[in-house]
Image (cartoon, grey):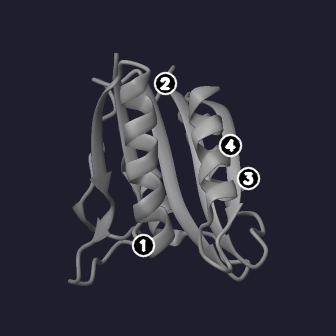
């Protein structure tokens, strides 16, 4: 089985993506980790042009999306990434949010974009990263991955 871990960089999400990778490998997944990076040049259309990030989900059985939410703002980069992904239909996804403050509608927005393209959100987890990650939060993430 193959898994894709796509994440938008923040200190906590980068650390959590490595934990997700390790836990998925324990479940015998072959894991590809990719950071979603916006290209610095302006794009004439409204979507962020991506410099990096795997957008073809066809080879993967499971996709784990990770992104930060600061304040109540949704992750515009993750939303733009999802709009550019292909072969989403039928794919199982899990969403992991590292949140400083309230998560607002970020989970709903990401879930809606996956569902709109025919994917299925299997589970989601919001981890408060306000004071950084501690053992309790890391164990919660490990448990989340083991249960998907």
Residue 124, label in figure: 4
- The residue labelled by disc 1 is 46
User: Mark 4 or 3 closer to N-term?
Assistant: 3
In the rendered view, would you say 8 is above or below 110? below
- The residue labelled by disc 3 is 108
The number of numbered discs placed on residues in the rendered structure image is: 4
| Quadrant hosting residue 98 | bottom right
Residue at the image point whose x is 41% and y is 25% from the top: 26
Q: Are marks 1 and 4 in contact (CB under 8 Å)?
A: no
Residue at the image point whose x is 30% and y is 33% from the top: 31
Residue 86: % across, % down: 35, 37
> How far apart are the two marked residues, 2 and 3, measured between alpha carbons?
18 Å
User: Mark 2 or 4 closer to N-term?
Assistant: 2
> How far apart are the two marked residues, 1 and 4, measured between alpha carbons?
27 Å
| Quadrant hosting residue 102 | bottom right
Residue at the image point whose x is 67% and y is 80% from the top: 131
Left or right placement of residue 80 versus residue 148 in this view: left
Q: Are marks 1 and 3 in contact (CB under 8 Å)?
A: no
The answer to whether residue 66 of the structure is visible from this angle is yes
Q: Secondary structure at mark 2?
A: loop
Q: Residue furthest front?
A: 135
Is the residue marked by circle 1 packed among few (<14), some (14-19), or many (20+) residues within 10 Å? few
- The residue labelled by disc 2 is 91
Q: Secondary structure at mark 3?
A: helix
> How far apart are the two marked residues, 1 and 3, measured between alpha carbons?
21 Å
Residue at the image point whose x is 69% and y is 56% from the top: 136
Q: Are marks 2 and 4 in contact (CB under 8 Å)?
A: no
Q: Secondary structure at mark 1?
A: loop
Residue 52: % across, % down: 22, 60
């Amino acid at each position: 089985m193959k898994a894709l871990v796509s994440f938008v960089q923040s200190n906590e999400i980068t650390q959590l993506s490595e934990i997700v990778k390790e836990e998925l490998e324990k479940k015998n997944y072959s894991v590809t980790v990719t950071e979603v990076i916006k290209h610095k040049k302006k794009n004439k259309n409204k979507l962020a042009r991506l410099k990096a990030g795997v957008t073809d989900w066809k080879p993967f059985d499971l996709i784990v999306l990770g992104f930060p939410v600061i304040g109540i703002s949704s992750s515009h980069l993750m939303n733009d990434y999802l709009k550019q992904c292909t072969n989403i239909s039928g794919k199982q996804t899990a969403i992991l949010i590292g949140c400083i403050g309230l998560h607002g509608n970020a989970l709903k927005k990401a879930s809606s974009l996956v569902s709109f393209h025919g994917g299925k959100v299997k589970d989601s987890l919001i981890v408060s990263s306000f004071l950084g990650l501690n053992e309790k939060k890391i164990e919660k993430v490990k448990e989340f991955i083991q249960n998907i």
